[in-house]
Image (cartoon, grey):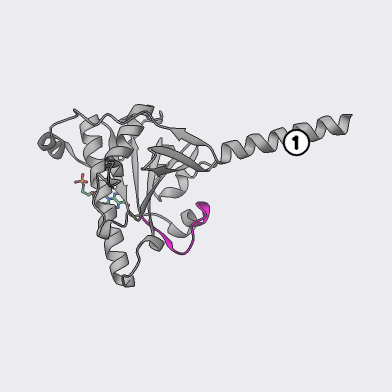
């Protein structure tokens, strides 16, 4: 009897852990109208390295990810950011205190890939650990068919730049702080994210409210 109850509890714990590990964070629909006029957002765009610890509101997170690389033409699935040969090879990982997610642009949801908080591993600067959101731009070379190694590197870097600038402009418009970052321990972060050799970390970008 006791063994039966023990087994039931163990199965329940395992099932709960699985649900968390494979959890999905449904985002509210993005607000795709309004915001700051483009020329003002360009005027306001800047890097900042100070962040309040409080997490982003779900609506802010939704708008931010849509602005970064969301689907703006549902008929074709094309995005707010261009990508070489429409490969859409850059995956956006979102590291938060609650765990690490990957942005599924087509479904506009965050899919949890790790329960672990890897914020501290996303950069070598002190502020990254305490910031509420660290985006990590990962190029999946499996989607970049028929190009040389050199072109793959070149296009992945360019495509990441467009996404990062979209994030900068959204942050300028929404009053959020952000900085794009190249100083990343790619080996340690890649291991923590369970990346394959064909998944290359290009840049990271911290986002949060001003302190
Ligand atoms: C590819 C790239 C890598 C960068 N890496 C870092 C970084 O690792 N850490 C950091 O604090 N800022 C980083 N920055 C931000 C730059 O320092 C910043 O853009 C520059 O000082 C100009 O400031 P502004 O963005 O306010 O115009 C990076 C910027 C770019 C474009």
- When asked about the image quadrant of residue 44, the answer is top left
State the quadrant of the N terminus.
top right
Task: State how many labels appear.
Answer: 1
Picture coordinates of residue 18, whole percent (x, y)? 62, 40
What residue is shown at x 49% (from left), y 61% (from top)?
196
* Residue 116: % across, % down: 54, 42
Residue farthest to the right, as pictured:
1
* 16 or 180: nearer the viewer: 16
Query: Where's residue 88, x and y in %?
Result: 32, 53
Check mark 1 vs ligand 1: CB closer than 8 Å? yes or no.
no
Q: Secondary structure at mark 1?
A: helix
**Rendering coords of residue 137 (x, y %):** 36, 51
| Residue 177, quarter of the rendered image | top left
* Nearer the observer, 45 or 57: 57
- Residue 129 part of the magenta-drawn span: no
10 Å crowding of disc 1: few (<14), some (14-19), many (20+) = few
Q: Residue at 77% of width from left, 32% of height from top?
A: 8
Q: Nearer the viewer, residue 209 or 18?
A: 18
Q: Residue at x 35, y 33 (%)?
A: 61
Q: Quadrant of the C terminus?
A: top left
Toward the front, the furthest residue is 75
Q: Residue at x 19, y 29 (%)?
A: 35
Residue labelled with disc 1: 10
Q: Is residue 129 left or right of residue 171?
A: right
Q: Is residue 114 left or right of residue 204?
A: right
- In the image: residue 179, left or right of residue 56: left
| Residue range corresponding to the magenta coloring | 191-202
Residue closer to the observer: 177 or 109: 109
């Amino acid at each position: 009897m006791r063994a039966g109850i023990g087994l039931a509890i163990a199965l329940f714990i395992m099932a709960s852990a699985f649900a968390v590990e494979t959890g999905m964070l449904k985002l509210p629909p993005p607000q795709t109208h309004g915001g700051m006029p483009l020329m003002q957002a360009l005027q306001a765009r800047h890097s900042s390295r100070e962040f309040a610890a409080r997490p982003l509101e779900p609506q802010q997170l939704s708008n931010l990810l849509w602005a970064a690389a969301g689907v703006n033409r549902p008929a074709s699935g094309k995005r707010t950011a261009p990508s070489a040969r429409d490969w859409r090879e850059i995956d956006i990982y979102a590291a938060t205190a609650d765990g690490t997610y990957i942005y599924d642009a087509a479904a506009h949801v965050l899919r949890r890939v790790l329960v672990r908080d890897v914020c501290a591993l996303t950069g070598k600067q002190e502020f990254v650990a305490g910031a509420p959101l660290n985006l990590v731009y990962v190029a999946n070379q499996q989607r970049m068919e028929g190009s040389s190694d050199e072109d793959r590197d070149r296009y992945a870097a360019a495509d990441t730049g467009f996404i990062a600038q979209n994030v900068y402009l959204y942050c300028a418009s929404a009053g959020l702080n952000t900085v794009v970052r190249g100083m990343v321990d790619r080996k340690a972060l890649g291991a923590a994210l369970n990346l394959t050799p064909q998944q290359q970390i290009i840049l990271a970008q911290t986002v949060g409210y001003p302190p």
